[in-house]
Amino acid sequence: MKLKHCHNFHDFRELARRRLPSPIFNYIDGAADDEVTYRENTASFDRCDLLPSVLSGVSDVDMSVTVMGQKLDMPIYCSPTALQRLFHHRGERAVAAAAEKYGTMFGVSSLGTVSLEELRLKHKNPQVYQFYFHKDRGLNRAMMQRAKEAGVEVMMLTVDSITGGNRERDLRTGFSIPFRLTLGGMYEFARKPMWGINYVTHEKFSLPQLDEFVNMGGGASSIGNYFTNMLDPAMNWDDVAEMVAEWDGQFCLKGIMTAADARHAVDIGCTGIILSNHGGRQLDGSRAPFDQLKEIVDAVGDEIDVIMDSGVQRGTHVIKALSLGAKAVGGGRFYLYPLAAAGQAGVERALGLMRAEIERGMKLMGVTSVDQLSPENLRFR
């Protein structure tokens, strides 16, 4: 199977499965507990039907959106995800370059493997910085100041990860950073030698946003211990309000799932919220963001930019979310599988296919711009 034979999300997933050692593939592919929420995130779109209008004159389609002050040429962006150079040796460099080519936003994680400064210098498209709330308030302030000095446009605080989800696939393979593989996991690495060759022949794996705080060599400062020991489960709305005021710019909360929490975000001065259950990787059994979208847009959509992620695999999924009032849509696995399969070329192909699907879908819906989409063109079963 080659990249040119990949035509959708499932094709990219299959190519990534063939090329990655299974512990790493399962880290991307897996979710929490029984993975019910992971499956429901995509299934939720299938319970909603599109109602197209015809004879509308749709020769030119404008799919651009403005979200949190950022102009995007297409209404889907590359959500921040951790550890990208584990999946392909170019990691965030490949994703940022592909996103720039398609004029959309990309995210850099606190657990990213390329520095936000390097990416900000090289690429002109909007950059969001995703970070976690630490017990060390000085570290939180230092990370925000670093992002401000680098020129990051949007600060994104993840609020659904005060503790790590129970990802049983990783427990079975022994996947962790640093690696503590089971015998079966080591065998899987031996079966895919090209990944190992790339891993050892390129620059040493690191976490530039946190290299002073997480020791990649092992010991007490592993990724698991980062979540267990460094993040602050006591984080509350007052803490976040202080951060919003200190940042004094575009600030969004990722992981909002209720109208009450959305209202809190408005009240403390956030400019965006992202409906997300972390792609099903945190609380299994939680509701799909698409199923919550209308309720939250109805509550606060006139006051704050409402975005959603989790489960997005198709251009029609994006169109359904926009029709319910989302300003834009984020995706993680939709670009991580192609990144793992083929680096920058894979991400570019995924974004190109997604752009073509959205444009085709808008034409078939009879609309020429995103603002013409509305709940009127949807029916729920």
Image (cartoon, helix red, strand yellow):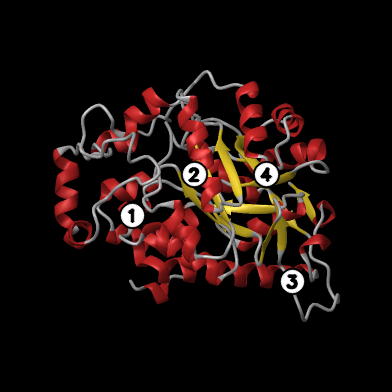
Distance from Cα at disc 2 to Cα at disc 1: 22 Å
Amino acid of disc 2: Arg
Of discs 1 and 3, which sits in the foreground? 1
Instruction: List the single residue furthest toward the top.
Output: 234
Residue ID for mark 2:
146
The 10 Å Cα crowd at callout 1, few under 14, some 14 to 19, many 20 or more, is many
Split into 4 quadrants, where in the image is the N terminus? Answer: bottom left
Q: Residue at x 67, y 44 (%)?
A: 249
- Identify the secondary structure beneath mark 2: helix
Element under disc 3: loop
For badge 3, the amino acid type reads Asp
The kind of residue tagged 1 is: Arg
Residue occupied by mark 1: 85
Label 4, secondary structure: give it: loop
Q: Nearer the viewer, mark 2 or mark 4?
A: 2
Question: For the residues marked 4 and 3, what is the alpha-carbon distance in whole angstroms?
Answer: 27 Å
Please identify, in this view, whether the residue under mark 4 or under mark 3 is nearer the observer: 4
Distance from Cα at disc 4 to Cα at disc 1: 29 Å
How many marks are shown on the rendered structure? Answer: 4
Q: Which mark is residue 334?
A: none
Q: Nearer the viewer, residue 297 or 138?
A: 138
| Mark 4 lies on residue | 249
From the top left corner, tell me how far across and down residue 7 is, in percent: 48, 70
In the rendered structure, which disc, 4 or 1, sits on the residue that comes first in sequence? 1
Secondary structure under tag 1 reads helix
Mark 4 and mark 3 residues within 8 Å of each other at the beta carbon: no
